[in-house]
Every structure is written in C-alpha cells, then in structure tokens.
Image (spheres, coloured by chain):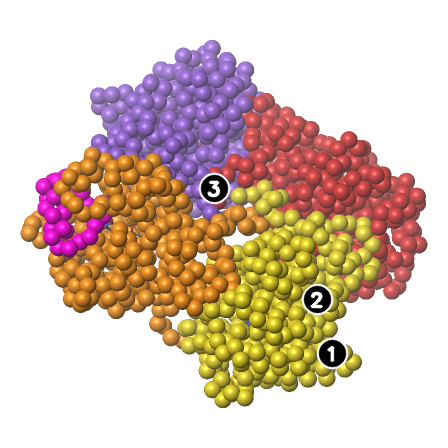
Chain colours: A red, B purple, C orange, D yellow
Amino acid sequence: MSSAPVCLDDFEKLARLSLPASVFGYYFSGADAESTLQRNKDAYDSLLIRPRILVDVEKVTTETTILGHKINSPVCVAPTAFHGMANDEAEKATARACASLKTCYTMATYSNTSMEDTYAAAKQKSRKQDPLHWFQLYVEQDREATKQLVQRCERAGYKALVITVDRPRLGRRLADLRHAFKLPKHLSLANFIADETRSGAGAYAGGAIDASLNWKDIEWFKSITKLPIVIKGIFRGEDAKLAVKHGVDGIIVSNHGGRQLDGCPATLEVLPEIVDAVKGSKVEVYVDGGIRKGTDVFKALALGARAVFLGRPIVYGLAYQGEEGVRSVLSLINYEFRLAMALAGCTSTDKITPDYIIPAEEISLAR
Amino acid sequence: MSSAPVCLDDFEKLARLSLPASVFGYYFSGADAESTLQRNKDAYDSLLIRPRILVDVEKVTTETTILGHKINSPVCVAPTAFHGMANDEAEKATARACASLKTCYTMATYSNTSMEDTYAAAKQKSRKQDPLHWFQLYVEQDREATKQLVQRCERAGYKALVITVDRPRLGRRLADLRHAFKLPKHLSLANFIADETRSGAGAYAGGAIDASLNWKDIEWFKSITKLPIVIKGIFRGEDAKLAVKHGVDGIIVSNHGGRQLDGCPATLEVLPEIVDAVKGSKVEVYVDGGIRKGTDVFKALALGARAVFLGRPIVYGLAYQGEEGVRSVLSLINYEFRLAMALAGCTSTDKITPDYIIPAEEISLAR
Amino acid sequence: MSSAPVCLDDFEKLARLSLPASVFGYYFSGADAESTLQRNKDAYDSLLIRPRILVDVEKVTTETTILGHKINSPVCVAPTAFHGMANDEAEKATARACASLKTCYTMATYSNTSMEDTYAAAKQKSRKQDPLHWFQLYVEQDREATKQLVQRCERAGYKALVITVDRPRLGRRLADLRHAFKLPKHLSLANFIADETRSGAGAYAGGAIDASLNWKDIEWFKSITKLPIVIKGIFRGEDAKLAVKHGVDGIIVSNHGGRQLDGCPATLEVLPEIVDAVKGSKVEVYVDGGIRKGTDVFKALALGARAVFLGRPIVYGLAYQGEEGVRSVLSLINYEFRLAMALAGCTSTDKITPDYIIPAEEISLAR
Amino acid sequence: MSSAPVCLDDFEKLARLSLPASVFGYYFSGADAESTLQRNKDAYDSLLIRPRILVDVEKVTTETTILGHKINSPVCVAPTAFHGMANDEAEKATARACASLKTCYTMATYSNTSMEDTYAAAKQKSRKQDPLHWFQLYVEQDREATKQLVQRCERAGYKALVITVDRPRLGRRLADLRHAFKLPKHLSLANFIADETRSGAGAYAGGAIDASLNWKDIEWFKSITKLPIVIKGIFRGEDAKLAVKHGVDGIIVSNHGGRQLDGCPATLEVLPEIVDAVKGSKVEVYVDGGIRKGTDVFKALALGARAVFLGRPIVYGLAYQGEEGVRSVLSLINYEFRLAMALAGCTSTDKITPDYIIPAEEISLAR
Ligand SMILES: Cc1cc2nc3c(=O)[nH]c(=O)nc-3n(C[C@H](O)[C@H](O)[C@H](O)COP(=O)(O)O)c2cc1C
Ligand SMILES: Cc1cc2nc3c(=O)[nH]c(=O)nc-3n(C[C@H](O)[C@H](O)[C@H](O)COP(=O)(O)O)c2cc1C
Ligand SMILES: Cc1cc2nc3c(=O)[nH]c(=O)nc-3n(C[C@H](O)[C@H](O)[C@H](O)COP(=O)(O)O)c2cc1C
Ligand SMILES: Cc1cc2nc3c(=O)[nH]c(=O)nc-3n(C[C@H](O)[C@H](O)[C@H](O)COP(=O)(O)O)c2cc1C
C-alpha cells in the first residue's frame, strides 16, 4: 500500500507526523472547543449534489475570474501566517506553486518572507505573466505604519487589499496555550523587518492590532489606495449590505477557520445570506473554511461563491514537500473539482447553480 | 458459536478475511470519503415499517415480473465487474446461481467470462428455461465496437440493454489509488477477447468510455436494436421524464453504489421523485445501492420500485463459496423478504404500498 | 464500590455475566439488526418531562387498576418464554414476586412450569388474595388444542387472555441462529405436558403457531370464553379501531421487544396513535418495550398508557436472584416511578397528563 | 506541554485526578442516566453566535447588577453543598474568591462553614465593601427551625433568600449509591451546629426537607422576612407566572445541575419560555446548569438571562487550588466572556440581544 497522499486529508496526517507538535498545533487548531472548526467541514457533508446525466462532458473547464483577473481554477490560497515553520522557502514556495498553477495567492501580514521577495519569487516562476497576489492586512493602532504597508503593497504589484475584520482580539486556541506557542526565534515578521521590535515572536501577541477598527476606517482605506478592497470575515447579511454601501469590491465569508469565535455557524451555512445581501451589486463573494474536496468547491460555487480559499491544506502541503507539496494539494483538489463537474453534468463554472444541490435535511428520511 | 453467515453483512466480513486487500478494496470501496456509500445503507434504516396484524399470511408469494419476464423474487443481480477475482468460475458461477433461483442476472461489460459462455453456463443450469440475462453497457468512443457488442447481446439471448450513464469519468476510489489496483494479469475483459489490446487491465483506466454520451445516443441505440433499454444511473425527476420522452423501458435508480460522485443523496431518497416523474408511463423503476436486508427490499417496493438489484453482496457470496455462495446470499435475503412480508401483513408484492412505511422523521420524538 | 444493582440496566449486566451466552443471547436479542430493540429504548430518551414545582407531594400513590383489578403500581410483567433457563423455580418465582408486590403477572404459553402450578405458587405467596394472572396465548393450527388451553386458563383463575398477534412467523434473532439455540433438554413446555411430542425444544420452531390467524378468530375466541381479551402486538390506529369493533377489552402496544419485525417504530412512538384510535371506547391501552426507568413509566402514562409491561428486566432479575431478584427489579422501578411523580409534581397516576411531557424535537435547538 | 488548566473542562479533569472517587462522584454526578446533565451542556453547543464586525470594541465591560447590586461580571456562584470535601477552608475559600472578584456568592444550606464565619471571611477579603452573599434555603418540616435560619441570614448580611424548590425528594445519583456516599465524619453541617443530631452525615438523607412545600409557604416567607426572594428550580412558564403573582424577586432557571429529575429539558431550552412569562414584571431571571465557557454566558444573556450561576466548575477549582483555584475558574470564564463579547461586536451586557444568536436547527443543512 502506497503512502502517497490521495486526498487532502492525507496531507494533514502527513503534516501531523512530520511537524513539531507545537507547530502542527498552531496550524491545525481552532478556538476553544473547536466546534466551529469541525462545523465548517461538516456543513459541506450536509449539502448533497444532484447530478444530471447524459450531458456531454467531454470538455470541462474550471477557469474563472476574480476581480477581473483570470485564474485557472476557483480554488485560491487564503492568507495564513508563518509559512517559515513549515518550509525554509516559506511564503516564496507557496507563491511559486500558485503562480505555476495560475491561481490567486493571498499573502498574510504575518509572513516570514517579505511581500517584495515573495512577489519576485512568484514572478520568476511564472515567466511571462504577473502572478496574481493579494495582500491580507491586519490594521494596526499606528495608522501611519498601516498606510506605509498599503503603499508598499501597491508598489509591489499586489492586486487587492484583504482587510481581516474578525480579529479585534486574538482567539483562544488551546493548543497554543498548552504549548506556550511562540514564533521560532530564527523567523521574523518579514513585512516589518525595518522595525527591530517587531522581529521574532514579539508581535504575535497581537497587541498591535486595532480593536477599534470600524466602517469609518474602511472609508479611510478607500481614500489612501486605489487597490480593490476585500473584507475578510463578514458573517451576516446586514454587514454585507454595509460593505456594499461602503464601496468594497469583495467579501470573503470566513470565520478565520474557526480560530476566532468558537460557536458561530459554518461559513457555508451563512454563505447564502451573504450572497443574497449583495445581490444587484458588483461585489464578489468568496468563501473559506473547511474546504477539503472537489465536491466542496462545487457546493460553494452552487451556493453563489465566485471562488474559494484554502487555509490549512496549503500549509500541510508546504510542510510535506515545499513548493511541490503546495502544488500537489492544489492540483489534487482541482482534479477532484473538475471530476465532480463532469459527474454532475456541468461543463463550466457558471453552470454550477443551486439547482444542483440540496440540503440533506430536505431529502433525508432520518432522525 | 457457528461462523456460518446469518445475514448479508456476514458475507462482507467473510470476504474481507479471505480476499487480498486490494481485491476486497476494489469490491468494497466507494468514491472519496465514501459518504454516499454509507448513506445508501443508512437511508433504509431511516424508513420504518408499520405492520398490519391479524391478516392471514399463511400463503406469501414474492413472485413478480420485470419487463414482462417472471422472476421468483424482486431481488436481482446488478452488474459488477471482474468476478474472476472472487472465484475461478467468475461470472458463470454468478449466472448459474441466478438461473437456479429464477432471478435476473445483469452481466457487466467488464466481465471475466464472455457473455456467450456465461449465458450457456446459466442455460445448462436451468435446464428447461431460458435464463433471464440483461447486459450492462459502457458506451465507447468507438461506436462501431459498441454496435457490435449490442448485436452480440441480442444473438446471445440477453433480454435487455442496461446503459450505464453515471460514469463519463471514473470516480476516485481511494482504496484503489492506495493499492494501485489493477486487474490481475491472468484475467481478461472477456467480452473483448477478439481485441488483444483490451485484455488484462488495459481498458480499466476507462479512457475508452465516451464522456460525450448524451440523449441523442439513446435515440441511436433505439435505432440499432430491438432490445428494451434500461438507463442505469438516473437520479433526478427531470432526467426520468427525459427518459420517458426518449422511449426507454426501464430506469435503475443508482449512484453506482457510491463509487462515482461522492456526496449525492441515497438512492432510496430519490426513488420517490423518480417514481413520481414516470407516473402514467410504462417505464419500470428499479433501485440499487445499499440493499442488505429483506426489510430493505420491502421498503424499496413500498416506495414504488418494481425490483431491486444487489451489487456487493453478490461478489461477497461469490468470494465465499462460488455459485453456492451467491445462492446463499440470494436465498437468505429472499427468505428475509418473505418473512418481512408476513410480519407486515402483505401476501404478495403488489400489496406492498406506501401505506406500510413511514420516514423516521415523521414519527420520531428525538433530536 | 458496591456491585449491587442500582438501576435496571445493572441487572442486564449481571445477567450477561452469569448466564450461558446462548441463554443470555436468547433473552437479550432482537430481530436482525436489532434497530427496533434499540429504538424502543431511545424513544423514551427523546421524550422530556416538564416538572411543576411547589406542589405538595408529601403523599404520592402509584396505585391503579387494569381491567378492573387493583394493582399497586402500573408496572406489570410481560409474557416471556422459558423462565426455567434463568432459575430453577422458573415461572413460579416470577409469579410469587408479582403476587407479593400486588402487580399483574402475564404467563407465556411457552412456560416451563404449568399455569396451574404457577398460579398455586403465587396464591400461596399472597395469602389472603387471589393473585392477578393473565395468560398469553399463541394460537395453534389445532384449534381444539387452543380451546382446551383457554378453558384451563379460566379454570385456573387467570383473569384475561392476551392473544399475541405479531408472531405469525418466528423473527430472525441472529444470536439464536449463531448459537443454534434450543430449549435445554431438562426443560419442557409445561403447559403442554400431556402431549409428549411437545416437550423439550420441539415446539419452539413454532411451526404449530397459526399464520392464518385473523379477526374472525377473535370473534371465535369471544364465543368460547368469558375472559376479557387483550390483543398484544397492535401497532397502528386502523388495527386498534378494528380491535374496538371486535369487542376486545385491552390492547398491548408492542413490537415483541424488537424480536419480530426489525425496523418498525418504537412502541412509544405509536402509542399516541393507538390511544387516539380507541378514544371513546372502554378499551384500555398498555405498552411494552424498552421500559427501564421510573421516568419511562411516567412518560408512557403521560402519553395515555394505563399500565406498562416489562419483559427482559424481569428475566434478568430472575437470573440474578430468583424470586427475590424479580422483586428487586420491580421494587426499584416502582421506587423510581414514585420519585419521578414527586419530582414532576404529580401525586397520583391520573394526574400524569400529556401536559407534563414534550418531545425533544419541539424544544431542542440542535441539529 | 504545560498541564495548567486553559479551559473550565480542564478543572474537571484535574479534580477527577486529585479527589477520592466517592467525593468526585458526589460533585460530578447527575441523577439516573445523567441525560439532563449532558443535555444542559449540549444545549449551549446547539445555539450559535452570529457576530457583527467592524464594531469598535476597544472598550468592553462585563459589569451588571442583580437585584440592584453591582457585580463585575454576570457570572455568579451557585449554591453547592459540602465545600469541605474539596478544601479545608471550605466555603470560606469560595466566598473569598467571589469577594475579590466582586461577584455574587450563594451559600448552600448544607455548608461546612457557617454563614456567619463565611461572611466574615469574605468581608475581610474585600476590605472596603460588603461582599454580595445570597443564601440558598432548603425548607424543613420544622418551620420554626427554618424561620430561625432566615433570621440569621438577615442578621449575617445576606442579601437574598434563594429557595430551592426542585428537591422535595432526593434525586437518585447512581455514583453516590454505588459508593454509599456519606459526608466524611470530620465535617459538619455548619449552619446547624447548635443542634447535635444534625452534625455529620446525619441530615444528608434529607428526610428533614419538606415535601409538602407549596406556594402558600412562599407567602409565609414573605411575611417573615424583608429579604428579596429568589425561587431556584422553576422550569415552566406557568410556574414563572405564579412566581410573579406571589411577588418573588428573582427566578433561577435550574434543574439542579441534572441531579434531581433526569430527563427534563436543558435549562437553556426552557429559558426563553420563562423570560417570556415574566415579561412586564420586575422579576429577574437567571440560569444555571452546564455553563462552561465564555460563549455559554453570552448565549444565556442573549436569551434573556440577567446573570448565570456556576455549580460544579467552582468546586473543581476549589479542589484544585482552594481560593486561588476558584478565582482561576471565575477569571478564566470572565476573560472568555469578555473576549466573546469583543469578537461578537458587543461592548456591554445590555447589547447582547437575541439578534446575536441562532439555533443550529434554523441554519443547519444536515440530518
Ligand atoms: C495557521 C493559520 C494561520 C492563519 N493566519 C491568518 C492570518 O494571518 N490572517 C488572516 O486573515 N487569516 C488567517 N488565517 C485564516 C485563513 O485565512 C482562513 O480564513 C482559514 O484558514 C480557512 O479555513 P481552512 O483552514 O479550514 O481552509 C489563518 C489560518 C490558519 C489555519
Ligand atoms: C465491485 C463493483 C463493480 C461494479 N461494476 C459496475 C460496472 O461495471 N458497471 C455498472 O454499471 N455498475 C457497476 N457497479 C455498480 C453496481 O451495478 C451497483 O450499482 C451497485 O453495486 C449497487 O450498490 P450495492 O453494491 O450497495 O448493492 C459496480 C459495483 C461494484 C461494487
Ligand atoms: C426472552 C423473551 C421471550 C419472550 N417471549 C414471549 C412470548 O412467549 N410471548 C409473547 O407474546 N411475547 C414474548 N416476548 C415479548 C414480551 O412479551 C414483550 O413484548 C417484550 O419483551 C417487551 O420488551 P422489553 O423486553 O424491552 O421490556 C418475549 C420477550 C423476550 C425478551
Ligand atoms: C455538588 C453539588 C451540590 C449541590 N448542592 C446544592 C444545594 O445544596 N442546594 C441547591 O439548591 N443546589 C445545589 N446544587 C445545584 C447547583 O446549585 C446548581 O443548580 C447546579 O450545580 C448548576 O449546574 P452546573 O453544576 O452544571 O453548573 C448542587 C450541585 C452540585 C454539583
């Protein structure tokens, strides 16, 4: 029996075996009882696919666009901190894999290689084209510092600003508390290296992140940058409507992979409410959290997501085989997704409509 | 304590013990997370039977007909590939068991004995009568080859063409990927023996199967054969209506035993929708997937199926004791089914109506 | 830690330890997958009690009547075969325990002490009063034999005839099949001792039981006896209405403890339908199956049962400590029931109304 | 990996390791099958939080009042008997921890230090202020004794009388029965020490508690004391309305932590019914049972509770590290609660409305 990974969950198992417990714990864990972490995944299993048959599926394409940029597959990479703990090439390896597969890479504020270096590495990989990079931003109390970060993003070629709004305070991840987790000393917050006090684990406590962040700040961002703004962490229709009103360009429906407030609904469960709230606007809706299979991607798109973002599986792939491992993860789920389309009778992503899915509760005979 | 099998699940346990892991894995596994595989079975447990009492059940008969042919019991044999891995007599053993019990045997395209040999073996067994054989067809890109296969079916005495429509691409069965499963070298795809390149594991990758298959092809089939056409793999009312419109004779509600698209509803869950869609037509509806008990047969018939088809239990019986083992499996479930009828107060299959069943969710007090 | 039983489930554990596996298997098992066996118990856990407070519960009485006879508690004893395998005093021990606690004992047709001896033993125990005995009847093909049995019942002092209608054929209990269970040679079917061919395990196969039994036979019974008639095994409102129409006196809602048709609803789940169907008549409704706690008794009464019957716990008590063990079982559940009444704010059984209960599904927030 | 507790469940694990089995059994166990014990906790997991984002949560306060007294957090301490088995300082340690954190301590009738000593210890701790102490009362058959107890409460500085109404008889806690649990000889019921016959385990059997307690007695209490009266153990809207009618000041929705009648709904499940029933009155509603996390507090408040009370976690903290351990428990859940508020977008307790929560069943896709 071969031990090569044949599904995304296999990468998690391999990472658990190879990484130090405290590092795996950091990557894996959710907040408190990890019920939202689990719920994110379970929600996908509760939605069923109703395939059409005798459709010509000789040619199936997964291509789509986000904010006007073409990507080969609607499976993108979510911002996750500290890739340096998984592989020495850190974010550069991840970004290269994305570039070679022509999908969107979102860099985290708390990265171990700088936005400039990472972009350069990716660009070298995808010789002819600009790689599609977005930048995830934690807004700091020191707005001047934040402003400088945004301006560097623009200069560096990043195509959108992803503002994370579900982390005014750090969630309690019990594994990290038990391990007294800290960023290993040899790694730095590379996007801040100019500032000595920021290097190493210092900033992780996150005191710097501004708990007073509110809609007025979004207006301020619009005044200081031309980059499209994506809000990450919206969870209710009311807030999605406010996002439209404040002129944002995209929304990532996210609960931070269950790492912040434990006990909220799964992202898939609130996706329809958000999609509904932005109807009529140009705001694009994406979703992350718990996506592990090609059929999960299919279901998210059927409920109205334009694309999905992967968090943990990417770092597991990175821990497994660096750039090549990230590529394996993305290629595998892309393959599964294309297969799901064929077996469901859909030849392109725009054909994946709500008609193809049904909540288990509507069809189940059980209790 | 005797180890003789007393329920169909026992045959699975025995097969797991006796077969090589890769072969058992091939027979047993479903696609991806195997959630549909499990759901197929669970659905039966979610439907409850409401027996009538003080009905004279001295005489109970399980006889019925499918497409006009009399069978002793509505429990038939679904097409499953590669019986040669379970027993040296391969499909011949299976067909003989069916013949002796007077039920319908469906030969798979990918069989290890040819349709002609298998039919002859079965005919010899059931001395006086023609055995009831159907032929399951995978439609190839090379339509001429397919046409020849159909014509051989007619000549060989097969009574219906079962066209499988849920396999435009091969589902991902993780066990097969882990074992790098291949058809053992000493076995061939016996229905293609004229063609050297087809022998052995070559064709299994299934590249030959035509992903462009669509309703127009069904019309073509009707133009090249007089055999009744049964579509296997229909899953939605809309498609059932199209089937009626295109003049098919029967529908097998099937998700390929959970081996193709993981995450669809159980077949039992969609059965009512299909039965409803064909109402008023002459199309007969059958169901397969997860049937393991006499009460499962009862429930399927109560929801409107004319007959049911067994997949895995048959190969497990075959692995256990060849022809005799298949007969044991069929006899046991037939006995259980007849007993269920008696205990529910039904003396013949046409009396098994929806009135005898209730979804657990309608009666349960729980959550 | 003491090992003395403190709840009815403890008696099951003790019986499992002390009895031969085949005997425990016979007592314990249900039909097929034992899903109904489990469901009978689970149903009680799905119904919740809503206590009233600040009710004076200084005095609580559990007394009631069935068919006009006073009993100290609505917890009675269901007919179960072969008490001789659990204790040498067999049915005599069970009946003595019931007599001393002043509750109803139902003798099974297939008992190891005769109805006459058992009654005599019980009468001796309860010096001043006639014990309350009912007789459970399996109707045989030989109606003359059945008639003689009924007449012996009348003469012997039995107060009602409980006709079991859910056993036209014997259910498949897998444990019995695996153990090739037979009544041990030293025991006989004591109610048939005149007939040599009946002794020992002979009759257990049950060929003698008449599968043609129907409502006409109920009329015949009414013509040959003055004893009240209780139908055991009714499961649907339609049949309860027929029972009323045919002039029966009582109904035991039962699925034979899950030993006949596996996959029917729990008895508690169908109880309301039966209670509703007989409304306006004088027919009393009882229930058995899965009752293991004082709160279960409370719930059954709240749903309209006049009394409940215990099957397995009685034989477990018998296996544990003979007559004393049966008394322990009954005393314990009576104590629990009285406590439940006090804690719920009910001082007598007629005050236990539907208002005190609520299905979990109506109040639960979960899924 | 550090073994310091990072969530309230950790304190339970630590207590299980350090306490004698019979003592841990006494603290931990619920009545009978402990289904209500479990249900109390599960109910919280079935209610989901829907966070708002981009709310300025720089400043979050958990302060509130109960019956007019200011507390630093709505997490109070429920009455639990026999703290002396967990720590030599017994109730004094618990009360000191409450005083230092400025929350309400409810003393149990069955305490191992007297109400006077305990109050004095707490007062010394919170130098400048009176500690907020309530007294839980079991009403005895001997009303004169009860009256004296009430008068001592008033004199001693207790601010409310909590009358427990769900214990007319002692619930069956199987662990206690198996361990033949008794209060260790060296401990006494310190609130009764004047009376020799009460010392030690004597009174625990609880014969003294009056099963005839009813609403008339509540009127009597109002005639003998000026202390506000809180009824503990109300479970239905009807009774809550009676409470309003009889002029009580507060209600603790409680099922005694699942220790009395097993099989009732979770307290969280009935909370809305009670809140609804008292609407328009000045009666404050609190809830206890199964609260283990900051998000549980949030959910209870969102459903209308003014404050929550902790039972078991407090004794576990006490067993772990005495006064310091109780403080750790309270500080931790307070921290979690404040964090939950920030992450949900609420800056003060009055902003925690039903709008922030949703039952899982309303949003789930599963079954
Ligand atoms: C190890 C790890 C670190 C993360 N770091 C960040 C981060 O720095 N900024 C951010 O907005 N989200 C962060 N996230 C959340 C992810 O962007 C994403 O929302 C989440 O991982 C999606 O769920 P999934 O892991 O189940 O795919 C992190 C997630 C993980 C697992
Ligand atoms: C080992 C195996 C091989 C199969 N091969 C075929 C096949 O060649 N053609 C086909 O139409 N269906 C095939 N099936 C699907 C079966 O016809 C049937 O739909 C399924 O097995 C029913 O579910 P069950 O196994 O739970 O009874 C196969 C199933 C199994 C288990
Ligand atoms: C060992 C055993 C033997 C039984 N024998 C009979 C019988 O001879 N006649 C009958 O009507 N019911 C019989 N029953 C069914 C019981 O009367 C009753 O319906 C059932 O046991 C109730 O369920 P419980 O065991 O969960 O309490 C038997 C049940 C058991 C467990
Ligand atoms: C060990 C223990 C002793 C208790 N003693 C009393 C008591 O003497 N009086 C009372 O009203 N409630 C008593 N209770 C019930 C608590 O006041 C409270 O209702 C319950 O513990 C809340 O549930 P929780 O333990 O899940 O937080 C006791 C509970 C426990 C666990």
Q: Is C150 covered by the magenta stretch?
A: yes
Part of the protein shown in magenta? C136-165
Rendered residue at 66%/73% (across/down): D226
Discs 3, 1 touching: Cβ within 8 Å: no
Rendered residue at 49%/59% (across/down): C51
Q: Which residue is labeled 1 in the image?
A: D130
Q: Which mark is residue B361?
A: 3
Q: Nearer the viewer, mark 3 or mark 1?
A: 1
Instruction: Give the chain of mark 1.
Output: D
Q: Which residue is labeled 2 in the image?
A: D66
Instruction: Give the chain of mark 3.
Output: B
Report the front residue among A129 and A367.
A367
Rendered residue at 36%/19% (across/down): B67
Report the front residue among D45 and C269.
C269
Instruction: Give the chain of mark 2.
Output: D
Q: How many neighbours does mark 1 have within 10 angstroms: few (below 14), some (14-19), or many (20 or more)?
A: some
Q: Earlier in the sequence, mark 1 or mark 2?
A: 2
Q: Position of residue A279 (x, y in %)?
A: 75, 33
Q: How far apart are labels 2 and 3 at the CA level?
A: 43 Å
Q: Secondary structure at mark 2?
A: strand
Q: Is B67 covered by the magenta stretch?
A: no
Could you tell whether A15 is left or right of C23 in the image?
A: right
The amino acid type found where label 1 is placed reads: Asp
Discs 2, 3 touching: Cβ within 8 Å: no
Q: Position of residue B233 (x, y in %)?
A: 48, 28
Q: Quadrant of residue B60?
A: top left
Task: Indicate if the residue with disc 2 has its beta carbon within 8 Å of ligand 4.
Answer: no
Q: Position of residue B260 (x, y in %)?
A: 52, 34
